[in-house]
Amino acid sequence: MREEGRISLQQLAVLLGSFLIGSSTILLPTVKARQDSWLAVLAALVAGLGVTWLWLALARLLGVPAVSGILGTLGPYLGTPMALLFLWYYLHLGALVVRNISEIYVTAVMPETPIVVFIGVIVLLAGFAVRGGVEVLGRLAEFLFPLLFLAVLTGHILVMATPGLVHWEYLRPVLERGPVPVLQAAFTVFAFPFGETVLFINLVPFTLDRNRAGRSLILITTVIGLLLTGTTALHIATLGADIARVNFPGLAVLRQVNLAEFLTRMEVIGIFVWTFGTFLKICVCYWALALGLAELGGLADYRPLVLPLGVIMAALSILIYDNFAGMVVTAISLYPVYAFPFQVVLPLLMLICAKLRGVQTPPAAAHVEEERQP
């Protein structure tokens, strides 16, 4: 393997948790589901647990990162086109997340600063982390995840503690327009963020004691899914019908915090969560892309690819949308349909092909836990 580092099961779990928190609350599916959006998140969580099982089963069976597994299972002629599809998705997703967080900075924090500045700084910092390898990503997540989780909970407490701010009656009536809008919105939430965890196919082979990963990953996905459900419900209960007209509901809610004229305008909490959550998400996309391209090209090391791939990712993030409105339309309406083959169809086909061809976990990969103790 071109990555010599190893991460613990705990580091894999907190990486997944940070990835899910990421930019997941930047945009909410409130246009379709309205006050039932929290039900859409809950339904998406159920589907998300299914896709977690799918990519975890595939990762265990292959025993190697996605590109190596694809080439080993399908051969170079069929495997190369499929590997290129996965690599394109890693690049595209990374560019999307870079643009998402950059749009927040330009729209809500420093509107006078050109967006290209934020994009360049984010990709540059992510490149440094990716060059450090998977162990650096694991340590970053181990440090940042407790802070992210605590920040989200703190934000919830401050909002609920502000007198007259939360109106739980805004969540009613439940299923006013039936289940169809909820299911439509759930499809959006499934694609963003739950389906995107398919990238973790590449991280499982580098995890110590990965045979016990299933329970931990299902647990962290469930916890974060419930946290996102509560966050969505709280946003609706605070903003009511206005939520569909707000660019960033999370910031709008935190701006209304006012405890005795002492703790006010706490949107810094949202900026903190989105900044570091999206940073880890970008790093995972970036690292998977560099590693996969090195495997496809037969390179001994992926690190020489980090800088040129960063330039490409930054350029793509600039070109990908014309403006914020384009980002919203793409994320809510187009992205779920576009991403579904990458998140579900291709991994499912790979799992079926691997089963039919009798692929077994390579001995070297099967005993990666014994190579190095944490």
Image (cartoon, grey):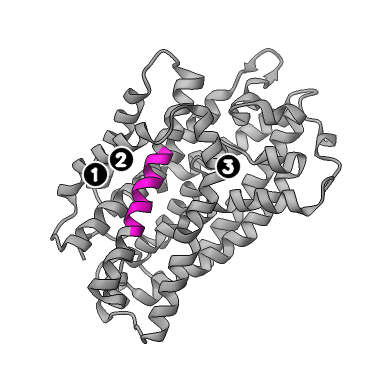
Residue at 81% over, 31% down: 167
> Comparing marks 1 and 3, which lies closer to the viewer?
3
Asked if residue 9 lies in the magenta stretch, the reply is no
**Vertical placement of residue 265 versus 141, above or below:** above
Q: Secondary structure at mark 1?
A: helix
Q: SS of the residue at dot 2?
A: helix
Q: Which residue is at a point 72% across and 50% down the rendered structure image? A: 182
For discs 3 and 2, the disc positioned in front in the rendered view: 3
- Between the residue at mark 1 and the residue at mark 3, the CA separation in whole angstroms equals 27 Å
Q: Pick whichever, 32 or 170, lies toward us.
A: 32
Residue type at mark 2 is Met
Range of residues picked out in magenta: 85-97
Across and down, in percent, residue 274 comes to 49, 35
Q: Say which amino acid is labelled 1.
A: Leu
Name the quarter where the N terminus is drawn.
bottom left
Residue 211 visible, this angle = no
Spatial separation of the CA atoms under disc 3 and disc 2: 22 Å
Three-letter code, disc 3 = Ile
Q: How would you classify the magenta stretch by its main secondary structure? A: helix
Q: Please tell me in which quadrant of the rendered image residue 156 appears.
A: top right
Does the residue at mark 1 contact the one at mark 2 (Cβ under 8 Å)? yes
Mark 3 residue crowding within 10 angstroms, few (<14) / some (14–19) / many (20+): many
**Image location of residue 219, percent across then percent down:** 57, 61
Q: Identify which residue is drawn at 33% across, 38% down.
A: 316
Instruction: Please give the residue where the numbered disc 3 appears in the rendered image.
Output: 332
State the separation of the CA atoms marked 1 and 2.
Answer: 6 Å
| Mark drawn on residue 309 | 1
Front one among 300 and 189 = 189
Q: Which residue is mark 2?
A: 313
Q: Residue 79: x and y, percent? A: 29, 70
Against 165, residue 45 (above or below) is: below
| Residue 301 falls in image quadrant | bottom left
